[in-house]
Image: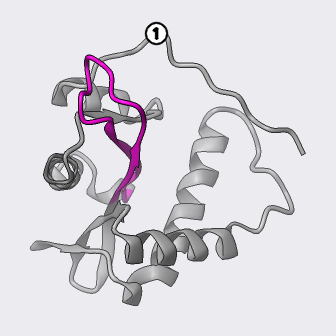
Amino acid sequence: MEIVYKKLSENELSRIIEMRIDQLKEEYTSSGKSAPEGVDLESALMDFYKRNLAAGTYVSWLAFDGERIVGTSGMSFAEKPPYFACPSGKVGILSSMYTDPNYRRMGIATNLLDRVVKEAEDYGCGTIYITASDVGVKLYESYGFKHNGNFMQYNFSK
């Protein structure tokens, strides 16, 4: 088995969207919830990936075993007013980190994380944010991510 790493292109979008939806469902069920019904994520994800890949505000690296995608990563770029810990105001938002369960504990997630963190550094980001799943916390802690107890979230209800 030789794992090959490539940047996401439009050629892989339909496979990535399917994997992203599976990942989200897995995260819901592992937290004891069931995924919401009636949400059209396929169209929304296709729109997101196409717009942000073209604008350069999203980058993703993939891990392949042959033709099979076995790991994914993603980094969105945003800007906010500069602050002491991030004088550039540029932030990375890490998402879509996923490794096929049959390929876990082989260094794939760390390799993907290295690549998207480097992309954020090259973009000029001073900070990277992530909302980590229970499975991912150990990876991020070992990489050097710190918990921020001030993080809060507001969701618009439908």
- Above or below for 149 versus 92: above
- Above or below for 130 versus 22: above
**Main secondary-structure element of the magenta-colored stretch:** strand
Residue 93 placement (x, y as % from top left): 39, 43
Place residue 125 in its image quadrant.
Answer: top left
Side of 138 relative to 5 (left or right)? right
Q: Residue furthest left?
A: 2
Q: Residue furthest top?
A: 149
Tell me what residue is drawn at x 64 percent, y 53 percent: 25
Please state which of residues 126 and 73 is positioned toward the viewer in this rendering. 126
Q: What's the magenta region?
A: 73-100
- Above or below for 88 versus 15: above
Tell me what residue is drawn at x 16 percent, y 55 percent: 115
Please state which of residues 131 and 127 is positioned toward the viewer in this rendering. 127
Please state which of residues 152 and 90 is positioned toward the viewer in this rendering. 90
Q: Is residue 85 magenta?
A: yes
Tell me what residue is drawn at x 47 percent, y 34 percent: 133
- Three-letter amino acid code at disc 1? Gly
Place residue 83 in its image quadrant.
Answer: top left
Q: Residue furthest right?
A: 158
Quadrant where the N terminus lies? bottom left
Q: Residue at label 1?
A: 149
Badge 1 element? loop
Tell me what residue is drawn at x 86 percent, y 39 percent: 157
Side of 16 relative to 112 (left or right)? right
Q: Is residue 96 magenta?
A: yes
Residue 62 placement (x, y as % from top left): 27, 68
Could you tell me how many numbered marks the image carries? 1
Rate crowding at label 1 as few (under 14), some (14 to 19) or many (20 or more) other CA atoms within 10 Å.
few
